Amino acid sequence: MLFESSHAHHLRKDFVLGGLFCQIRRVRYSALLICAALLVGSATVDATSQESRADSQEDVEQDHPSTSLSQRSAATREFLGLGALPDKVAAARGMPLFAQNCAACHGQAARGGIGPSLITSDLVLTDEHGEQLVPFLKKGKAEKGMPAFSMSNQQLRDITEFLHLQVESVANRGTYHVLNILVGNAPKGKAYVQAHCMSCHRPETFLHIASKYRSPEQLQRNWIWPVRDRKITANVKTSDGTISGQVTQISDFRVTLLDKSGETHTIDRGPDIEVQMNDPLAAHQRLVMTLANDDMHNVTAYLETLK
């Protein structure tokens, strides 16, 4: 699948979509689902683990160009729990069968039409090679307008492989082919940097960023959201005074700080508690929410000229 690395929009979309497939396909791994539910349900942010994940992310980014498309695909498939690899030969046989018998309701690529999308169907996502779908297709679901199909088992399995390949093309981000993203206007990118970035950064910072990342997509991703190299700190004002230190955990209910002496302070948040956060990436958080595609590409094009 062709995929343009438009970080500000696609990152949020990919995260939600990837999480959906991961949760559904890993239904048989109850322990992992419990961990995922706890992570999603918790309002607490562990600042220390965020930093360690950021460090490991940088290592992955540097190694990315040395991995093949098939390696990235396999690694993403394992991480998301997508199940067995679809049989592409069988899927090719199943495509015309699906088009003739199913596309009128479900769309040519199973994304939905007058009938629902099959890409996020529980029945499709929990099937491997037709062990659930073939019996279902033979029986149909008359009350929902779904007829029974009298095709052979092989033909029905071919249709299921076509469906699994459609899921693969949507969910497996490791198969995405990144387009050329150097489509911006470098002079406009330089003007954007001078207008929006120089209050925090020095000119040599951009030379360092440009030389650090080998591919344009890495460069774009990391100038928008850099790897965190400084701690999040806070000043918490209470009735007894002010406590300052590194933020190790924060939620709507409490904040935990590690002060210079190594002592941990956990403060319950309330109307009389004032928390002043000092996040070095706060400006980038605001940037992600407002950055236009043209500005993103323009800045990337400008940074490429500094290499």
Image: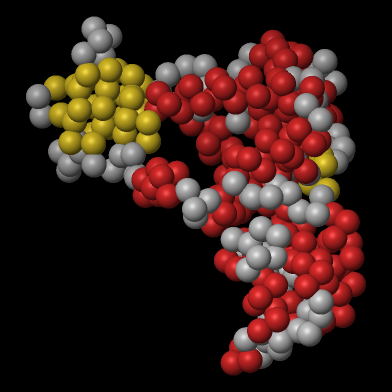
Q: Is residue 252 left or right of residue 126?
A: left
Q: How is the image coloured?
A: secondary structure
Residue 106 on image: x %, y %: 74, 77
Q: Residue at x 18, y 36 (%)?
A: 268
Q: Residue at x 37, y 31 (%)?
A: 46
Towards the viewer: 258 or 155: 155
Q: Is residue 180 visible?
A: yes
Q: Is residue 23 visible?
A: no
Towards the viewer: 127 or 193: 127
Residue lying farthest front? 153
In the picture, the quarter occupied by the C terminus is top right
How many numbered discs sit on the rendered protein? 0
Determine whether 256 is above or below 203 in the image. below
Towards the viewer: 49 or 209: 49
Residue 281 on image: x %, y %: 51, 27
Q: Residue at x 71, y 60 (%)?
A: 129
Towards the viewer: 125 or 112: 125
Residue 197 on image: x %, y %: 63, 26
Determine whether 140 is above or below 259 in the image. below
Determine whether 250 is above or below 143 in the image. above
